[in-house]
Amino acid sequence: MDLKTLTFIVVGLSFALYIGVAIWARAGSTSDFYVAGGGVHPVVNGMATAADWMSAASFISMAGLIAFLGYGGSVYLMGWTGGYVLLAVLLAPYLRKFGKFTVPQFIGDRYYSNTARLVAVICLIFISFTYVAGQMRGVGIVFSRFLEVDIVTGLLVGMGLVFFYAVLGGMKGVTYTQVAQYCVLIFAYMVPAIFISLNLTGNPVPQLGLGGSIETGEPFLNKLDAVVTDLGFLEYTKGNKSLIDVIAITLALMAGTAGLPHVIVRFFTVPKVRDARSSAGWALVFIAILYTTAPAVGAMARFNLHTTVNSGLVSGDAFAPEAALQYEARPDWMKRWEATKLIKFEDKNGDGRIQYYNDKSTDTAFLAKAEAAGWKGSELDVDRDIMVLANPEIAKLPDWVIALVAAGGIAAALSTAAGLLLVISAAISHDLLKSILMPDMSEKAELATGRVAAAVAVCVAGYLGYNPPGFVAQVVAFAFGLACASLFPTILLGIFSKTMNKEGAIVGMLTGLIFTFGYILYFKGIFITPMAENVPANWLFGISPEGIGVVGALLNFGVAFLVSKVTAPCPDHIQHMVEDIRTPRGAGAATGH
């Protein structure tokens, strides 16, 4: 059976599973639609949260980032994992104790203001659409490569599936579908990682294989350092970011994780406060399985890619004319990815071979050797987003493993997209229409409105997936920056500061959101031309757009405190409510409708 047929079968079976689960767990009330009825077991919620969290960025793009950034990519691991600790300790139990449906609802009630709720809805929509753009791009990449359809067709299929189980089942359908998706994605991620680790290091545990040795007895990471430096790249095990930027990005990702509305809302679905903390712990366990494997996947993918294109890296002379791979003899996987335009080759010196190296290296001795060998510039452009998906093919694993990875990539992208679309629809139907504009709306009308809002959000997400403002992990990092700067400080102050008033919260949120979005726009030019070159010399305090959310959060805190000191104090009944939220007992089912 050929690879394409096999992939259709494996992906088709996974889709049938999701659709079956969605029909079984369809929502019958607004409580089912927004919080899955509030009775989800902590272990199930932990697994669903892990799938909700481990998006296309985690499955497809994170190992690709680590593969190309090396040690510098560790900021994503530290930030995203640390964020769950923040969430479990600082937010999840208290928000569950509050016992309402959505994050804007918490902000609106805590700050006794529909304006605050409206600003929270705006922040949530900014964050969620930025995030969902990355997921839909992941869907398009997987479909276009593995099912060999164009990106538009792939997006339409993905949108149709998400529409079906998010609109039909709401949070209840999404929860149990995400459990199935977690099982698919983690199996699909681990199987090739184990095979490749076994092939390269003889150790079936990828985490141990990364620190192990290759066949010659040389430590794997030492060999990888030698391979990349032979091609003019920085050592794999050395950092390529300044200390302040590493700290800023890590903190922005941590606070951003804790402020992501589609993650927070998952903790409203468990029966008790204690279950919210417990499910955060379970989510960490399920996430750690993939996150501790990603560094090994990234490093081994980078090693396999370079040694496939340049055999001299293993045999001894990377500059020998016969060391570079002949373009006509390139492997099938490279031809398939070329068709998607995510791998591009340009024969700059006309020798019919592929020279892939760092032609922007500052090592003059290396550049002199490259010039003497007749190299006229790097001839291969490899999109970072394909590294995990192409990894089994580069390593020559069986076709069924490649088909499995396709199903896993789609599961990861769809699970997060569904969670995001659900919080967008809840923000529009519950927080904007029901709570502010149309308070007399019936439950039935609200449920119908939520489904229409989800359908519209799917269409917008599809457009953003077709025309994304960056590669997957980059787009997702911006969403974290926006969440870090806007929602996280406001939620934290709402729980731990009795005196924070509505004026402070509103001005703080807007300050953090506008500053962070403006900074990203200035250097990255999302949908417009950047206004300045995105280089460290131009950055504020040496902090990149990926880490600027932490400055936005500090501005949010500072402005909020300043404004609260010069405006009317927080009412007594709100201060009593804050004291009650911080008491770790006595929460009932989610209410507020």
Image (cartoon, rainbow, N blue to C red):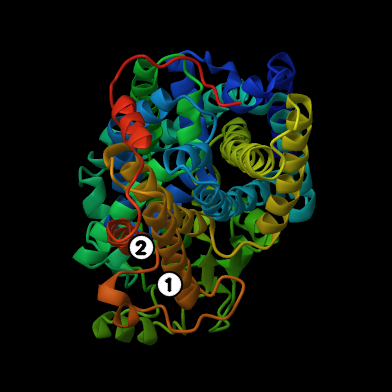
The residue shown at (62%, 21%) is 31
Label located before the other in sequence (1 or 2): 1
Is the Cβ of the residue at disc 1 closer than 8 Å to that at disc 2?
yes
Q: Quadrant of the N terminus?
A: top right
Q: Position of residue 572 (x, y in %)?
A: 33, 36
Residue 54 at x, y percent in the picture: 48, 38
**Height in image: 585 above or below 322?**
above
Q: Which picture quadrant has residue 56?
A: top right
Q: Nearer the viewer, residue 152 or 510?
A: 510
> For this view, does 309 lie left or right of residue 318?
right
Relative side of 293 to 133, left or right: left
Residue type pointed to by label 1: Tyr
Using a 10 Å C-alpha cutoff, classify the residue at mark 2 as few (fewer than 14 neighbours), some (14 to 19) or many (20 or more): many
Q: Amino acid at mark 2?
A: Gly
The residue sitting at 27% across, 65% down in the picture is 245
Which residue is identified by label 1?
A: 519
Q: Quadrant of the C terminus?
A: top right
Q: Nearer the viewer, residue 357 or 385?
A: 385
Residue 178, quarter of the rendered image = top right
